[in-house]
Amino acid sequence: MAIPSRSRRGAPVPLIALAALAACGGGGAKQQVESLDSWRATIDLATEAQLRGWVTPRYAHQLRDKARTALADAAKSANSSDLSAAARDSVTDAARSLEAAVASLERVGP
Amino acid sequence: MKGVALIHDVLDAQLLDRTQQKMGRVDGLVLELRDGEPPRVAELLVGGSIAAERVGGWMTAIVRGCCRVLRIEPAVSRIPFDAVEAIGACVEVKVDARSTSAMRTERWLDEHFACRIPGGSGEERK
Amino acid sequence: MSRKIAEVALGVVTGIGGFLEVGSLATAVQGGAEFGFQLGWAVLLGSASLMVLMEASGRLAAVSDRTLIDQLRERFGIRFFLLPLVVGFVVSLLVLASEIGGVSLALQMATGVRFQLWALPIAFLAWLLLWRGTFSLVENGTAILGLVSVVFLVGAAALHPRWTSVGAGLIPSRATHEVARYWYLAISILGASISPYLYAFYSSGAIEDGWTTEDLGVNRITAVLGNLFGGGLALMTLVVAAMVFLPRHIHVDAYEQTALVLTPALSHPGFVFFLATLAITCFGTTLEIALAIAYMLAQGLGWPWSENMRPAADSRFSFTYTVVLLVAAIPIALGVNVLGLTNISMVLTAASLPVTVVPMVVLMNDRDVMGKSVNGFVGNVALVALAVMSCVILLAAIPLQLLGGS
């Protein structure tokens, strides 16, 4: 059962929550996509901020590393879960958008 | 004769020694039963083990366990009720705190912790 | 008269500069990012509640010359007292760890050095300030530096929000989406504002500063204005997040994302001032909570205590804050997720409110304790409403943590 990535922002989820989430199946992919889209938007803002000199490159790199962790989590859960083909495709698309955003950020920075 | 509300004003009250130093709380009371006369308060008790007994057996077991691990006996200070000078916001007694076992841990930490670190000792107020 | 004015001014500044910290920043930013201005009422309710509790605990200390913790032990006995002591200790320790995490993250974002490596040095610096400093240095020094958090007011103004919409958010409304998440964040915001260590610390501070019945006016103005303006800053934080993160659909999954929030409005200074705010306010709160835990134990068990005494004069008190700082730094040094820890500790703080608020209803109406300064009708309505709210939060906290939290 895929653990929605939003759950990873916190401490270990109690077993009872896992059971509840397991019962809610399809919500996992939706939350995964939302999380990836959120990270893409974060990286887009970080790219703009770095271009304009609002933030330091070292800070932007920290966000990039966090985004990469979100990508790795998404890849793991997409591979190991029983998502439908459509759900897996939406997660893959969102992951690709985030990868492209991360690549843009890397082109900007030193 | 002015009465004293023992539970309300004495039990769990802050104890101050003759130098106005805080020396723990009144964790227990000892009543002396006398033949043909009303009971009187004989002693005030200060000590974690006494407070633990009032909480319950499980708490007493925890305190005794901690004392076993640290290889110390639970400290209980017995202050004669005759030493009580005043009962108000605090209970003031004609006793020097440092001479009682109520300050045993305080003295030990003073010697082995606070006084060994620069800035720990000196004039009482910073 | 001028001395009183100076006292009030300092007290209000302390309230403003000391309001924001790791929890109120995280919960306000998450609230604004996910629900726009809709959770403004939770910020308002949190600061209003804190006003009531701080004023009450300050009045209790000034009138009875005993702190809130003293009165909880003396009026309710050791058996009941163990409950607020243990609950307060555990919850405060979690929040302390979060605050050390907040400072560590701010330094990581500024320097690139991983936050885990900052935890122990920060705990050491906090310890050093408590070891050598006095109560007024600790309370006032960091609060004055914490005025840097006014940057959120500047940032909000620069974004030109529709203030009528911000105002509308101050009225409680139904969640437009994700109901469980909405109420989870509402409770988290309340927990971030109404922390029991805050009003326990405040009543200890009243004794440290030697307050008497002549200071009741100062107490009232300080508690009300300090929290009004401080809560206003938390509201501005929510507004900024609503204007910057919500339109971009940015949800905060990592604390590091929050440092972007002021950049569209204030460019590079926005980034710098955000990090300064996070570092300074969390450090100030670290000092407060370490002291508050030491106050709780020392007062409850009758040890000598005062931040104005040399550590050797109150060695159990100084040993306590030394140990708790070290213990709280360890999870951060081991890399525990700071945002997750913060979220959980805010909800637990909210859930722990009944064990202090309910007894306060009794204490503030006890003439033996308060004399002529017992609560009036309005004070009692407010305090009882708070007590009821705190019980509702306790019942709702765990289901909401499971459904709407991590």
Image (spheres, helix red, strand yellow):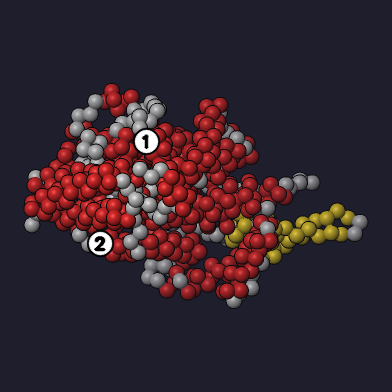
Is residue C52 or residue C336 the one in the foreground? C336
Query: In the picture, residue C250 is in which quadrant?
Result: top left
Determine which residue is flagged by label 2: C114
Is residue B6 or residue B75 the one in the foreground? B75
Q: Residues within 10 Å of mark 1 (few under 14, many from 20)?
A: few
- Tell me residue B106's x, y (percent): 54, 67
Query: In the picture, residue C38 is in which quadrant?
Result: top left
C331 above or below C224?
below
Determine which residue is flagged by label 1: C178
Identity, as a three-letter code, of the amino acid under mark 2? Arg
- Tell me residue C403's x, y (percent): 43, 42
Give the label, 1 or 2, closer to the camera: 1
Residue shown at the point (32%, 34%) measured from the top left: C35
- Tell me residue B31's x, y (percent): 78, 58
Query: In the picture, residue B101 is in which quadrant?
Result: bottom right
- Secondary structure at numbered mark 1: loop
B116 above or below C239?
below
Identity, as a three-letter code, of the amino acid under mark 1? Glu
Please identify the residue farthest to the top as the structure is shown.
C164
Q: Is residue C237 left or right of residue B108?
A: left
Residue shown at the point (10%, 50%) measured from the top left: A104
- Tell me residue C11's x, y (percent): 37, 41
Q: Is residue C30 left or right of residue C161?
A: right
Residue shown at the point (20%, 46%) measured from the top left: A93
Please identify the residue farthest to the front as the structure is shown.
A85
Q: Chain of mark 1?
A: C
